[in-house]
Image: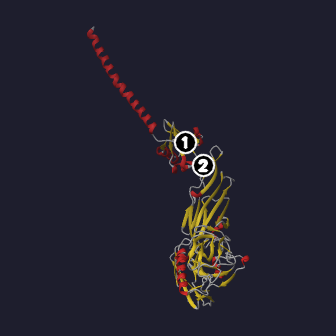
C-alpha cells in the first residue's frame, strides 16, 4: 500500500513547490505596475488646471506649462506684503493622471505681489509670470486697470520718468466685481534739465480723460494748460520752474478703473548768458551796471579797463546778476571795455567816460599836507571796510537825505569839487556832499543797514559808516556826537548822530558820502531820489 501511495505523494509535493513561483509570476508584475502607476501619477505631467473647483479649466499646453513653472519657481517667504485677508484668493488644482495638487493662489492686484499658499506656507510668484497669469481669461478681473499710469517728461534727448514723484489714487475692479483702491505717494523730488532750445513734452503711459499742467517761476504762473500744448511754452532764461501735472481717468464703457494722479517736478532751465549795459556813456563819479541774464549759477570772470573792477563787483540781485562798475573821480575820459567770461563763453562790452567840470571849494586855516595825509588814511580805512561787503540787500526802498527839512540844511560843497587849503591845491577831492545846519541837528540813516564803523578819523572826525548790502555804503562825517555803535542794525530815518565840526571841516557841517564797492559816487545822482532799481542807476528795495 505504501508502494502504491508513494507516487501520489511525490506528485502532490511537486505541485506545492510550484505555487510560490506561480504567485510570483502573476502578482509581482501587478505590484510593479501599480507602483509605476502610483509614481507616474504623483510625478507625471499635469493634464489640466482647474480654478475654483472647475469654474475655470485650462487644458492647453501653454497655460498648463505656465502654472507648472509658477509652482516650481515660487520662492518661500515669511510674511506677505499686506494682511493675507486683503488678497483675492483662488483655489487652483493641478490635475495629473491619477492624482492632483491643490494650492491657493492669492492676488493683491499687483503682479509684484502675488502669492501661493500651500498649507501654512507662503510662496511668492515670479513677477513676470504673475503678469501673464493675471491676463488669462477668467483671471483678468483681479487686475483690471490696476497698473498705475506713469508720466514721462522729455527735454531734448533726455527722457525722465516721474514714477517716484507721483501721487496716485487708483481704483480698480477685483474678481468679485467690487472696487478696491491703491495709492502711491511721492518718494523724492525729480529734477529735469532744459536748455534754451529744448521743448518740453509730457507723455502718459495711459491717456487720461483730463489733464492740466501748471508751471510756476518765482511764485508766478507762467503756463497753465494741457500737457499736449506744453511744447509751445517758451522760457529762455536761467532759473527754476516748479511744474505740477494733474490728470484724471473716468470709469466709462468697458473701462473698469478710475483714478487721479498728481506729479510735481523741478525744471532747471539753462539759457545762454546775455549782457546788457545800463548806459553807453558815463561821467566820473557815476555808476555803470551790466545786467547779466541767465548766469545766476555760473562763475563770472571780469577784465575791465576801469581800475578796481573784479569778480567782487558781481552781485546777485533778485533772480539776476548785476556787475557794478563805479567810475572813480580820477578816471580819464575815453572808451573803456569790460570782458565777461561765464559758462565757457565770453563777451566784450564797451562804454565811454566823458569829461566833466567840477567846482572848487576853498578852505581857510587848513594845512593842505596834513589834510591830504588824513584823507589817505581815511581812504585806506574805507577800502578795508568795503573789502567784504554783505552779500544780501539790507536797504529798504528809496534812500533818503541824511538831514530832514526842519533842520534847514543846505549843501555847501558838491560832489567832486577840487579842494584848496590856504591857497594850495590839495590832493584830496570832495567825495561827498557837505550839508550845513545848526550844530546838534540830528543826522538820520539814509537807509537800513549795519553799522560797520562808529568812531573817529582824523579827516572826518566823528564818523559813522553803514553797510547797506551788495557793496553799497554810506558815510557820515564831522559829527558832534555818535548815537550808534558798531555791529548794530539801524533802520531808515533812525538818528545816528548829531551835526558838528570835527575833523577837517570848514565849519559846522555834515560830510555825507555814498560808496559802491569802495568807490565814491555822486549821492545826488546815484543814490538819493526816486525808487528805481540797480539797472537804472538807482537803488531800490523792490
Q: Which of 426 and 51 is in front in this view?
A: 426
Give me the C-alpha separation between circle 1 and circle 2.
14 Å
Q: Looking at the image, which residue is at 64% across and 61% down?
A: 245
Number of residues whose C-alpha sits closer than 10 Å to that of mark 1, classed few (under 14), some (14–19) or many (20 or more) = many
Q: Tell me if residue 257 comes above or below residue 33 in the rendering.
A: below
* Secondary element type, mark 2: loop
Residue 326 lies in quadrant: bottom right
In terms of depth relative to the viewer, which is nearer, 272 or 281?
Answer: 281
Task: Name the residue nearer the viewer: 382 or 154.
Answer: 382
Q: How crowded is mark 2: few (under 14 residues within 10 Å), some or many (20 or more)?
A: many
- Residue wearing tag 1: 105
Image quadrant in which the C terminus is located: bottom right
228 relative to 272, above or below: above
Locate residue 79, reporting x and y percent. Answer: 52, 42
Residue 375 appears in the figure? yes
Q: Position of residue 3 (x, y in %)?
A: 26, 10
**Label located before the other in sequence (1 or 2):** 1
Q: Name the residue under label 2.
A: 143
Residue 409 placement, left or right of 475: right
Q: Position of residue 222 (x, y in %)?
A: 66, 68
Extreme right residue here? 406
* Residue at (32, 16) in percent of width and height: 12
Amino acid at each position: 500500500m505504501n508502494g502504491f501511495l508513494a507516487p501520489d505523494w511525490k506528485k502532490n509535493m511537486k505541485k506545492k513547490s510550484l505555487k510560490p513561483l506561480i504567485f510570483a509570476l502573476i502578482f509581482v508584475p501587478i505590484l510593479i505596475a501599480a507602483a509605476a502607476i502610483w509614481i507616474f501619477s504623483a510625478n507625471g505631467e499635469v493634464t489640466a488646471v482647474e480654478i475654483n473647483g472647475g469654474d475655470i479649466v485650462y487644458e492647453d499646453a501653454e497655460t498648463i506649462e505656465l502654472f507648472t513653472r509658477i509652482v516650481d519657481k515660487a520662492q518661500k517667504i515669511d510674511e506677505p506684503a499686506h494682511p493675507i485677508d486683503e488678497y483675492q484668493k483662488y483655489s487652483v488644482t493641478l490635475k495629473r493622471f491619477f492624482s492632483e495638487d491643490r494650492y491657493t493662489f492669492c492676488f493683491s492686484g499687483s503682479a509684484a505681489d502675488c502669492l501661493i499658499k500651500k498649507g501654512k506656507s507662503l510662496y511668492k510668484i515670479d513677477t513676470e509670470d504673475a503678469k501673464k497669469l493675471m491676463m488669462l481669461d477668467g483671471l483678468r478681473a483681479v487686475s483690471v486697470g490696476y497698473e498705475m499710469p506713469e508720466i514721462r517728461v522729455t527735454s531734448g534727448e533726455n527722457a525722465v520718468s516721474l514714477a517716484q514723484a507721483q501721487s496716485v489714487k487708483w481704483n480698480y475692479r477685483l474678481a468679485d466685481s467690487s472696487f478696491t483702491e491703491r495709492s502711491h505717494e511721492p518718494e523724492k523730488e525729480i529734477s529735469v534739465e532744459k536748455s534754451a532750445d529744448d521743448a518740453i513734452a509730457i507723455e502718459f503711459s495711459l491717456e487720461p480723460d483730463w489733464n492740466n499742467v501748471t508751471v510756476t517761476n518765482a511764485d508766478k504762473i507762467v503756463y497753465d494748460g494741457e500737457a499736449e500744448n506744453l511744447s509751445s511754452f517758451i522760457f529762455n532764461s536761467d532759473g527754476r520752474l516748479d511744474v505740477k501735472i494733474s490728470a484724471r481717468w473716468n470709469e466709462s464703457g468697458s473701462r473698469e478703473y478710475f483714478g487721479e494722479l498728481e506729479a510735481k517736478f523741478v525744471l532747471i532751465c539753462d539759457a545762454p548768458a546775455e549782457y546788457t549795459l545800463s548806459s553807453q556813456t558815463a561821467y566820473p563819479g557815476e555808476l555803470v551796471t551790466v545786467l547779466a541774464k541767465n548766469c545766476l549759477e555760473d562763475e563770472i570772470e571780469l577784465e575791465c579797463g576801469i581800475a578796481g573792477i573784479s569778480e567782487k563787483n558781481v552781485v546777485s540781485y533778485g533772480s539776476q546778476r548785476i556787475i557794478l562798475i563805479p567810475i572813480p573821480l580820477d578816471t580819464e575820459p575815453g572808451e573803456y571795455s569790460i570782458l565777461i567770461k561765464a559758462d565757457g563763453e565770453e563777451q566784450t562790452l564797451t562804454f565811454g567816460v566823458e569829461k566833466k567840470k567840477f567846482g572848487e571849494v576853498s578852505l581857510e586855516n587848513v594845512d593842505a599836507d596834513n589834510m591830504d595825509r588824513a584823507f589817505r588814511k581815511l581812504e585806506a580805512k574805507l577800502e578795508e571796510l568795503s573789502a567784504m561787503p554783505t552779500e544780501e540787500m539790507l536797504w529798504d526802498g528809496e534812500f533818503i537825505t541824511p538831514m530832514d527839512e526842519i533842520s534847514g540844511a543846505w549843501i555847501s560843497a558838491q560832489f567832486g569839487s577840487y579842494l584848496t587849503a590856504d591857497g594850495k591845491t590839495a590832493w584830496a577831492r570832495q567825495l561827498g556832499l557837505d550839508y550845513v545846519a545848526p550844530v546838534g541837528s540830528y543826522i538820520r540813516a539814509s537807509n537800513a543797514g549795519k553799522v560797520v564803523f562808529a568812531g573817529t578819523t582824523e579827516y572826518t572826525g566823528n564818523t559813522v559808516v553803514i553797510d547797506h548790502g551788495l557793496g553799497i555804503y554810506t558815510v557820515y562825517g564831522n559829527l558832534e556826537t555818535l548815537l550808534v555803535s558798531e555791529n548794530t542794525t539801524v533802520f531808515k530815518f533812525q538818528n545816528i548822530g548829531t551835526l558838528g565840526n570835527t575833523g577837517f571841516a570848514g565849519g559846522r557841517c555834515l560830510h555825507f558820502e555814498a560808496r559802491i564797492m569802495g568807490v565814491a559816487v555822486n549821492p545826488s545822482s546815484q543814490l538819493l531820489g526816486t525808487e528805481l532799481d540797480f539797472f537804472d542807476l538807482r537803488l531800490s528795495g523792490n
